[in-house]
Amino acid sequence: MNIKNKNKKQTAEEVIKERYKRAVEKSDIISFVEKLIFFLFLIWLLFGAVFGFKVVTNDDMKPRISADDLLIYYRLNKTYRANDVIIFQKDNVQYIGRIVGVGGDKIEIDDDGSIKINDSVIGEDNIYYATKPYDEGITFPVTLKEDEFFILCDYREGAKDSRYFGPVNTKEVMGKIITVLRRNDL
């Protein structure tokens, strides 16, 4: 109500119009808040249950994925295959790696750096570092159970992967990487 209207008596019609105007403003605010809550719930659902974010903390997947890159991964994927890049968790620490062996495969890494899967040497065109077994890691050959993966990082020298802690169980997989946002693009 403005100052003019205070000094003047309002008609019933004017009072009704003013109250209607205030009610419409309140309903607009309530409608906005309801839509905002729904939108926030939808965002939480998408990025809390369907998709996830991870900032890379090391160079274990170098040169394709570097420290400080932002990864978006899909959590609902249940079928993984060789060459998929995944996020997994071991001892409450998250790691990123590439699947090289799936359930039923026999994995062997020689001292000369060759990888054998089911007694066949595999060639990796996009890996630029030697793949050697660790002195304090697992012993080879390793035969994977149906619900296990053998994971290697792209930067093979010193990265923590299945050579260090053994096969990764499907329950430890958090999701498959679907995109990488480079740190200089952010």
Image (cartoon, helix red, strand yellow):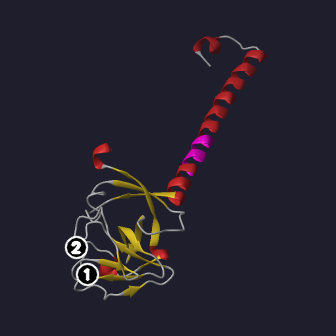
The magenta region covers 34-41
Q: Nearer the viewer, residue 33 or 60?
A: 60
Three-letter amino acid code of the residue under disc 2: Gly
Question: Residue at left 21%, top 80%?
Answer: 112
Q: Nearer the viewer, residue 2 or 161?
A: 161
Q: Position of residue 131 (x, y in %)?
A: 25, 74
Please tell me whether residue 16 is drawn above or below residue 125 in the rendered image: above
Question: Residue at left 54%, top 63%?
Answer: 76
Among numbered discs 2 and 1, the one appearing first in the sequence: 1
Q: Position of residue 23 (x, y in %)?
A: 69, 29
Residue 113: quarter of image? bottom left
**Callout 1: helix, strand or loop?**
loop
Residue 160: quarter of image? bottom left
Q: Which residue is mark 1?
A: 133
Q: Position of residue 105 (x, y in %)?
A: 44, 81
**Residues at marks 2 and 1, CA–CA distance in whole angstroms:** 10 Å
Q: Which residue is mark 2?
A: 158
Inspect the magenta stretch and tell me whether residue 169 lies in it: no
Q: Nearer the viewer, residue 162 or 112?
A: 112
